[in-house]
Structures are given as C-alpha cells and as structure tokens.
Image: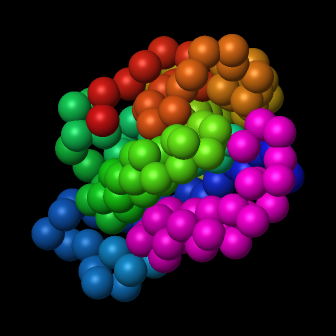
Amino acid sequence: LDVVINNAGYAPDKTKKGENVSRSDMMDAFEINTLGPLLVIQQSLPLLRNGLMKKIINISSLLGSHAMNPGRQIAYSTAKCALGMITSIFAKELENEGFTIVAVHPGTVATDMRPDLKLPGAMPHIQPDESADGILNNVVFAKENLNGRFITWNGETMAW
C-alpha cells in the first residue's frame, strides 16, 4: 500500500450556533472526522511500511484552521482541528521512516454536503473532479517534502 486518503466528512451542525450544538453532534463529528481517520491510519501502517510512497493524506477543511476559521460549525470545525493534530503527531512520529503525512483542505467543493452552493449568488466553488485532480497532482505526486503540512488542493500552504 502506497497511499491512504482519509476522506471522512460529516457536519451535523451546519446551521447551529455553538450554544445549541448537542453532545451527540459533537460525538458524531469526532467519531467520523477524527477517530475514523485515526483508526484507518493505525490499521494501514503495517501495509504502508512496506509501500514505496508511504503517504497519508487527511482531508481536512479550512474550518479546521485556527487562523482561517470563519467562526461557525463548532462540532465539525473542532473535529477537523483535532484531525490536524493527529496529522502533526504522526508526521513527527513517522518522519524517520520516510512517511509523508499531510492535512489537505480540498477547497469549497460542490457536493451533497454543500447544497447551498447550488443557490444563486453562492460563494465561489470547485467541482469534485477539480479537487481530486489537484490533490493527486499537488499532494500524492508532489516532488517536495510536504510532511506535517496543512495545504490546499492546489498546493498552497495553509496556517494551522
């Protein structure tokens, strides 16, 4: 196995303010967006250690960045922020084994998770194939060392 892409994404709190988010919303967001990728990494490591590329790509979000967060979706944002810490810790733990572990903001992608992007006057967005192509070209097949970084689908560095 050469590459693992953790592409979990669940936002139970898209329309809720922080004061109204339930324990269940928080737990569901953490289980899917944080714990799920952690378990995938743990189970994949034996196979990745025998691979040539040894890359783990954790699909995160702009909302998981302390510096860039617009201040909404507390359950989703907190879970993606925690995924960033998982990325950072594994990057340090495995760097001497030749691993590259990164967090990637896939862009504002027009998917079923974002029906608001279909409305007139919606924010600029990209299609899923554009995001996927960017991740392949700028992350999976990147020549530079990206280990431990938080980047966008088009290769730009993001602030944690």
Residue at far bottom of view:
24
Q: Identify the coloring.
A: rainbow
Q: Position of residue 53 (x, y in %)?
A: 77, 37
Residue 100's image quarter? Answer: top right
> Eyeballing the image, is 68 above or below 66?
above
Query: Which residue occupies 40% across, 53% down?
Result: 89
Query: Which residue occupies 35% across, 58% down?
Result: 82
Side of 87 where 50 appears, left or right: right
Towards the viewer: 9 or 91: 91
Side of 137 where 160 appears, left or right: left
Q: Is residue 72 magenta?
A: no
Towards the viewer: 12 or 77: 77
Query: Which residue occupies 83% across, 39% down?
Result: 52
> Eyeballing the image, is 92 above or below 118?
below
Instruction: Give the tally of numbered discs.
Output: 0
Main secondary structure along the magenta-highlighted residues: helix
Which stretch did the figure color magenta? 29-54
Q: Is residue 38 magenta?
A: yes
Side of 136 where 146 appears, left or right: left
Q: Position of residue 63 (x, y in %)?
A: 36, 43
Residue 16's image quarter? Answer: bottom left
Q: Position of residue 37 (x, y in %)?
A: 58, 63
Residue at far front of view:
96
> Eyeballing the image, is 138 above or below 22?
above
The quarter in which the C terminus is drawn is: top left
Residue 122 appears in view: no
Q: Position of residue 79 (x, y in %)?
A: 38, 61
Residue at far left of view:
19
Towards the viewer: 107 or 46: 46
